Image: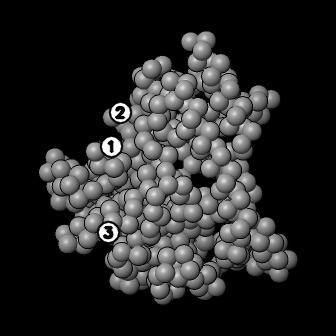
């Protein structure tokens, strides 16, 4: 259905380069604090760890159906019923090897080579890279204070006109990476209705659900049954390395996604699926973790502007601060390299998220411990004062 483009179309993911250097420095004994990647400092919830231990004892580490264990799909369905008052048939749920696999499956099932797909700028760089690798036309739509830092029907129409092509897909993240934007119910419904009226596939990235601090955390399942919803156990559930996520699919996409998953991934790891099903019982524990992120958020929201790093967008959700570095540098990659080399603090250059204007922006992850955030900001303050 799709022909892969040249690998040169895939851009480097600078955050991973910074992380690799941070790891090398840490292994060399340096006191590195990483604010470069969105990896929670907390462990997986106890219920998940206990379920995994039991599964190991009983040898449950084999293949499962491509769409996932029935018990996990039913647990995900129950999650939507309890949290979003939405009735989702477990048959419409596909368990995936993290959200990364879900994006691949969605793009392959929905689009042909050359199709135009809109994403926000700034936005998660893997969207752009996967779309490019699959030979799709990436239409990056600027999100600003004027648009509420999210995609809108008007901004999509402007982007479509400028690109000179008809959109076949729209991908929205809420809460968003790196901006932290939470797209509320009314705005989400307008966007879904717009896409539906123009036969545009709507993909809703909800992997930071559970980590909303301001605004209305709405799932697309509440406003439409035609969207493709993608979520993951990596962020709120603190299970990054377990590589397990899920999709909610319109009925017509269930079989195409199943066939693709059978050929590409076989299934998500059974051990991870069993642990993920148990994680739904751990919201009390996970909400305690969330409060530590809230403490970090409030601290950074106050201190970073005081250091001359004003916020480039509100910190309403996820666990990122996206800041303007132009007071100190218009080369965010060089700024990130120097900060790591000179004070052992790692953060992500804005070029990952915005290839046009990200040279003067930086993303700080506050998924780490409260003490690490305080130490990192102390180092940054002293470093900037020297400059």
Report the front residue among 201 and 326. Answer: 326
Where residue 282 sits in the image (x, y, percent)?
Answer: 71, 70
Kindly identify which residue carries mark 1. 145
Q: Is residue 4 visible?
A: no
Residue ID at (36%, 60%): 171
* Residue in the picture at 76% in, 79% down: 60
User: Is mark 2 in CB contact (under 8 Å) with mark 3?
Assistant: no
Q: State the image quarter where residue 130 is shown.
A: bottom left
Q: Earlier along the polypeptide chain: callout 3 or callout 1?
A: 1
Would residue 88 be found to the left or right of residue 272 on screen? left
**Residue hosting label 2:** 357
Q: Residues within 10 Å of mark 1 (few under 14, many from 20)?
A: few
Vertical relation: 271 (above or below) 213: below
Q: Earlier in the sequence, mark 2 or mark 3?
A: 3
**Disc 2 from disc 1: Cα separation:** 15 Å
In the rendered structure, the answer to whether residue 144 lies left or right of residue 23 reads left
Q: Which residue is mark 3?
A: 189
Please tell me whether mark 1 sits on a helix, a strand or a loop.
Answer: helix
Tell me the residue at 26%/71% (across/down): 193
Q: Is residue 50 visible?
A: yes
Badge 3 element: helix
Q: Name the secondary structure under disc 2.
A: loop
Q: Residues within 10 Å of mark 3 (few under 14, many from 20)?
A: some
User: Residue 351, labelled with which disc?
Assistant: none
Residue 7 on image: x %, y %: 40, 46
């Amino acid at each position: 259905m799709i022909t892969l483009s040249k690998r040169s179309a895939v851009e480097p993911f600078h955050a991973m380069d910074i992380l690799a250097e941070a790891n090398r420095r840490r292994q060399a004994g340096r006191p590195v604090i990483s604010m470069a990647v969105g990896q929670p400092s907390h462990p997986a919830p106890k219920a998940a760890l206990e379920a995994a231990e039991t599964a190991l004892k009983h040898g449950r580490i084999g293949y499962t159906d491509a769409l996932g264990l029935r018990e996990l799909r039913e647990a995900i369905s129950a999650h939507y019923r309890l949290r979003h008052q939405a009735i989702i048939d477990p048959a419409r749920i596909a368990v995936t090897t993290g959200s990364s696999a879900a994006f691949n499956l969605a793009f392959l099932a929905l689009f042909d080579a050359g199709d135009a797909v809109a994403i926000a700028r700034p936005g998660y760089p893997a969207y752009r890279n996967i779309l490019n690798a699959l030979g799709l036309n990436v239409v990056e739509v600027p999100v600003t204070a004027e648009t509420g830092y999210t995609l809108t029907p008007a901004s999509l129409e402007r982007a479509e006109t400028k690109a000179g092509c008809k959109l076949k897909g729209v991908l929205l993240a809420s809460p968003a990476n790196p901006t932290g934007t939470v797209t509320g119910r009314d705005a989400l419904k307008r966007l879904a209705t717009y896409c539906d009226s123009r036969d545009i596939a709507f993909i809703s990235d909800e992997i930071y659900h559970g980590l909303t601090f301001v605004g209305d955390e709405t799932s697309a399942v509440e406003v439409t049954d035609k969207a493709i919803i993608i979520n993951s156990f990596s962020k709120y559930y603190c299970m990054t390395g377990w590589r397990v996520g899920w999709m909610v699919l319109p009925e017509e996409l269930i079989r195409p996604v199943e066939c693709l998953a059978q050929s590409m991934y076989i299934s998500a790891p059974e051990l991870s699926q069993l642990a993920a099903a148990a994680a739904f019982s751990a919201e009390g524990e996970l909400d305690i973790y969330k409060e530590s992120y809230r403490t970090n958020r409030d601290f950074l929201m106050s201190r970073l502007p005081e250091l001359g790093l004003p916020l480039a967008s509100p910190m309403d959700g996820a666990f990122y601060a996206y800041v303007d570095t132009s007071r100190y540098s218009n080369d965010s990659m060089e700024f990130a390299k120097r900060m790591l080399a000179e004070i052992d603090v790692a953060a992500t250059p804005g070029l990952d998220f915005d290839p046009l204007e990200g040279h003067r922006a930086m993303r700080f992850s506050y998924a780490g411990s409260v003490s690490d955030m305080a130490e990192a900001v102390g180092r940054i303050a002293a470093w900037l004062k020297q400059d």
